[in-house]
Amino acid sequence: MAEPTRWAGYRGALIKQGRRLAVILLPLCLLLGHVLGGYQLSLISRLDALLYDTRLRLTLPGSLDERVVIVDIDEKSLAEVGHWPWGRDQLALLTQRLFDQYGISALGFDVLFSEADTSSGLHALQALVRHAGPDDPLLAQRVQQLAPQLNYDHRFAQVLQGRPVVLGYYFTSDREGRRKGVLPAPVLSSAGLPAEGLQVLDWDGYGASLAELAAAAPLAGFFNSVTDEDGMVRSLPLLAHFEGQYYESLALGLYRAAKGLPQVVPLLASAQAPPVLEALGLIGPGLQQRIPVDERGTTLIPFRGAGGPRGGSYRYLSAVDVLQGRVDAAALRGRIVLVGSTSPGLLDLRATPVGQTYPGVESHANVVSGLLDQRLAVRPDYALGYEVLLLIGVATLLALTLPRVGAVTALALGIGTLLGVIGLNLALYQAADLVLPLASCVVLVLLVLGGHMSYGYLVESRAKRRLAGVFGTYVPPELVDQMLLAPERYSMRAASREMTVMFCDMRGFTRLSEGLSPEALQDLLNSLFSRLTLCIRRHQGTIDKYMGDCVMAFWGAPVVQADHAARAVAAALDMVAEVALFNRERQAHGLSPIAVGIGLNTGIMRVGDMGSDLRRSYTVIGDAVNLASRLEGLSKLYGVSIVASESTRAQAGTTALWQALDWVRVQGKEDAVAISCPWPSPTQDQASSLTDDQAQAWDQFLLAYRAKDWAVCQQMLENLQNVECLVGLCQLFKQRLLAFSQHLPAADWDGVTVLDTK
């Protein structure tokens, strides 16, 4: 019977573990499919972007970078100088003042010069000369004299000549591939690169500066940004591909201009086919710098603050103030300067994680600052492997721990895992500028934790409520709580198991009940049984049933207890002490005392839900149970409160001080049984009713008794009968000695007392 039960328990445990693993494996497989590119979960992508933005905002430096200054074509400048575009004579003056008067180190224009400047009227005058022809030679001469002053593009080009100026332009991809202006020389050529080329952003059109300006300022950089699916600008490309050549961005070109134009070399990830760009290297006099980029050649913008003149990240100077010389020279000397606009009318405002109307020119300034600090965050090429390993690692951790703990611990574990993953991600970002995916792991933990809690509430709680309903009236709350941790292990199915059973009966109940009214008798039984039940539950025993004036209990089921015998003995001693206290209270009210007899036996018995279809109960049956009932009946005969079998004594050990009583053969049993009485051990706090010496003296008496040494027995009884707790026992053996003096036992008498009554 035990083997099928064990296998049923294993099967139940496997089913439970399988369900719990499904709660973890299903979200894991779902997320791995997204991470590995099998399909796209837009929610995960949006959450990753949201988490990146949150992390970015939490780690903003929020300090002023004095090294980079923005000359702003703001509303004030437009109001004083005029609407945009300004005449190139104004830009020539602006450039000249910045270098000659203010002593800047490098200048970048986040504006486009693809159209000729006609604001001076020179083109109109030249058209007039062509129309007048030879009829007005004086007009042609005068226009020729004015041409150098009115050719603003030429004047601007002359100012740009030989200065560390980076002009801005843009790349485009459209069906027509429009091209306008002159591109600068590429920063990298396809020659010397792998045949597959680099997997950077590719374009088929551009809008660049006029040829004259491009010739005067050969260094130029594109100012394209990368707009994500949610419309946010988080990245800027540092390198772009166009017709087999590679061009640098405005920020990279401006940084190189400030650093003396170091050479740009591509750094490729090893063992990759096709080759994947891992970083850009800058090599020059006194400079060897590695600039991390992703495989597209882009870098995440290292935002410093909210952006704009009031953002506090960069000093914004109004362009008209620079033109008029109203700026303190100390604010610009030796600085890297970007010319751009924050005016809404010029449409250079972007939606970014740190602001919905972020100046585009400040995005480039942020990248220049990151290059100066040699700190640019990047999503590494191994981010995919990291994400997969993290998902599997977290799923494994949760699979090994969640099924073993309760709801509160599971919640704490889930929150701790979530905080650990977030903390690791933030630490790698702060310490190594690594932007690693986070959303998938966060979602995994939340899904697993939510599934685990839901499973526990909807499935396991139902089983636990059923278990508590079935066993709650039999089993102490402490054992019920223990059973609820693994409800699949416990059922009402019958099983054979070694256990300890107790019968406790009230002596003289019939005589006592005759003198009491039904209500008084009910109060007596309820009061006594309530106290005795508490003693049993205190030692985690299971109440089997109440039978009139008797209570039956057992230890070792439904929860297996290795020390079931010791618990039962301790409970019996506790019950005897409780009855003594109960009697003192009764005597204080003038009521007669009561006595109880307790029988204990340990052995193999069957336990389970037994009975009929109409009425069933969780109980124990078997010869071992019957013997305990017989032993309870012997307690009155031997004048003690507790009678325990030898098997109980052997397993209970030092739980009590043991006094051997006799060897008996009860009705229905052929084998003799050694019976003993446990007394409170002298090692316990309470005083013992029997000392070690007295117990040893009684053992010597029994040896003499079984040796038929009647004279010695008689003398020993005379000495022991003065021990209060041995009075009844001594009286019993005196009667036996008297009977033996009249009729000697048979020659084969073995010292066993045969009891013919139950």
Image (spheres, helix red, strand yellow):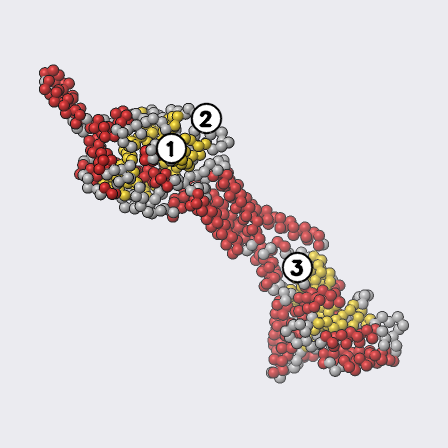
Say above or below: 517 vs 444.
below
Q: Secondary structure at mark 2?
A: loop
- Amino acid type indicated by mark 3: Val
The answer to which of marks 1 and 2 sits earlier in the sequence is 2
Residue at 48%, 35% in the rendered image = 37
Closest to the observer, 43 or 48: 48
Q: Position of residue 618 (x, y in %)?
A: 66, 61
Q: Residue at x 27, y 37 (%)?
A: 104
Q: CA distance from mark 3 to mark 1?
A: 78 Å
State whether residue 722 is above or below residue 703: below
Q: Quadrant of residue 153?
A: top left
Left-right relation of 6 to 196: right
Task: Identify which residue, 93 or 198, lies in the foreground.
Answer: 93
- In-image side of 708 versus 375 (left or right): right
Element type at mark 3: loop
Determine the residue located farthest toward the bottom in the rendered image.
590
Residue located beneath label 3 in the image: 560
Can residue 667 be seen at all in this image of the molecule?
A: no
Specify the quadrant of the image occupied by residue 504: bottom right
Closer to viewer: mark 2 or mark 3? 2
Q: Are marks 3 and 1 in contact (CB under 8 Å)?
A: no
Give, as a three-letter code, the residue at label 2.
Pro
Report helix, strand or loop for mark 1: strand
Quarter of the figure with the C terminus: bottom right
Q: Residue at x 80, y 76 (%)?
A: 701
Q: Amino acid at mark 1?
A: Gly
Res 194 label: 2
How many angstroms separate mark 1 from mark 2 (CA)? 24 Å
Q: Earlier in the sequence, mark 2 or mark 3?
A: 2
